[in-house]
Image: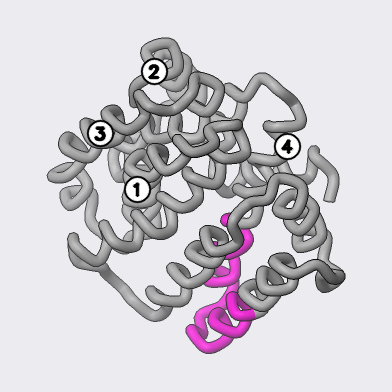
């Protein structure tokens, strides 16, 4: 799967994290981060393209099985994104258990119309948090990578608002403390890994007026300069 195709998928389906990926200076690192985000987008698509929770679970289980193949040493099933993800995971020695969190989190909420606050936080921590930790690992955070999880949780909560699974008021009531936690943890990330959490700077807009791309770019640049979301 070509870099341009990956970037296009992420830009259409996850514009905030796509914009944050523009902060990654190294093109190879940026392509790897976009591979991760494209995988996450594919999991979301598995739910969106069908109204049947059973069909969605079958699609997600296919990806879970693909991850089991990726975790091994043999060939992976013939699929452009699965092959690209396999190459990334094996080259970077990424923990597949964190990728499995993304799949399991999607399966856990199949058929749900709404999540309560505690359930939403748990989901966002597992899915958004694990994605942010993986992105931080790709960007060289090493042992500090888990410090990306609180910001990833905030990114995950914003995604739940956009999907209508929690009302904007739920995030609004939590965003202040969550941002403080995210910033305390993000201080321990190396500067080069900040793009893994930068999209959290846009989370407070979820459910409200959608800022223009220029406004969001400027907010991300300012977050990067400050090193805070």
> Which residue, given by chain and number where applicable, does mark 2 sit on?
227
Residue 109, position in %: x, y? 38, 74
| 46 sits to left or right of 119 | right
| 32 sits to left or right of 200 | right
Residue 28, position in %: x, y? 76, 31
> Which residue, given by chain and number where applicable, does mark 4 sit on?
31
Identify which residue, 51 or 83, lies in the foreground: 83
Mark 2, secondary structure of its residue = loop
The colour mode here is: one colour
Q: Residue drawn at (56%, 77%), measured in percent from left and top?
A: 50
Graded by Cα atoms within 10 Å as few (under 14), some (14 to 19) or many (20 or more), the crowding at tag 2 reads: some
Quadrant into which the C terminus falls = top left
Q: Is residue 152 above or below residue 97?
A: above
The Cα–Cα distance between marks 1 and 2, rounded to whole angstroms, is 17 Å
Residue projecting furthest to the left: 173
Contact, CB < 8 Å: mark 3 with mark 2? no
Mark 4, secondary structure of its residue = helix
Graded by Cα atoms within 10 Å as few (under 14), some (14 to 19) or many (20 or more), the crowding at tag 4 reads: some
Q: Earlier in the sequence, mark 3 or mark 2?
A: 3
| 138 sits to left or right of 191 | right
Residue 186, position in %: x, y? 36, 29
The Cα–Cα distance between marks 1 and 4, rounded to whole angstroms, is 23 Å
> Which residue, given by chain and number where applicable, does mark 1 sit on?
153
Identify which residue, 46 or 192, lies in the foreground: 192
Graded by Cα atoms within 10 Å as few (under 14), some (14 to 19) or many (20 or more), the crowding at tag 1 reads: many
> Which residue, given by chain and number where applicable, does mark 3 sit on?
179
Q: Bounds of the magenta span?
A: 40-61
Residue 121, disc:
none
The Cα–Cα distance between marks 3 and 1, rounded to whole angstroms, is 10 Å
**Does the stretch in magenta take in 135?**
no
């Amino acid at each position: 799967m070509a870099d341009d195709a990956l970037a296009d998928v992420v830009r259409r389906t996850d514009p905030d994290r796509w914009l944050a990926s523009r902060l990654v200076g190294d093109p190879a690192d940026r392509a790897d981060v976009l591979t991760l985000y494209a995988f996450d987008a594919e999991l979301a698509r598995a739910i969106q393209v069908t109204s049947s929770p059973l069909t969605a679970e079958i699609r997600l289980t296919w990806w879970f099985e693909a991850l089991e193949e990726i975790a091994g040493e043999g060939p992976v099933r013939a699929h452009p994104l699965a092959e690209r993800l396999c190459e990334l995971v094996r080259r970077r020695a990424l923990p597949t258990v964190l990728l499995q969190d993304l799949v399991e989190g999607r399966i856990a909420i199949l058929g749900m119309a709404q999540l309560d606050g505690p359930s939403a936080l748990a989901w966002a921590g597992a899915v958004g948090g694990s994605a942010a930790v993986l992105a931080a690992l790709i960007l060289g955070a090493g042992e500090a990578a888990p410090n990306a999880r609180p910001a990833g949780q905030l990114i995950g909560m914003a995604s739940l608002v956009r999907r209508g699974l929690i009302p904007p008021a739920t995030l609004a009531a939590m965003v202040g403390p969550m941002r403080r936690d995210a910033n305390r943890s993000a201080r321990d990330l190396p500067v080069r890994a900040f793009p893994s959490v930068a999209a959290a700077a846009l989370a407070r807009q979820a459910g409200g007026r959608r800022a223009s791309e220029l406004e969001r770019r400027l907010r991300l640049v300012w977050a990067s300069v400050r090193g805070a979301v």
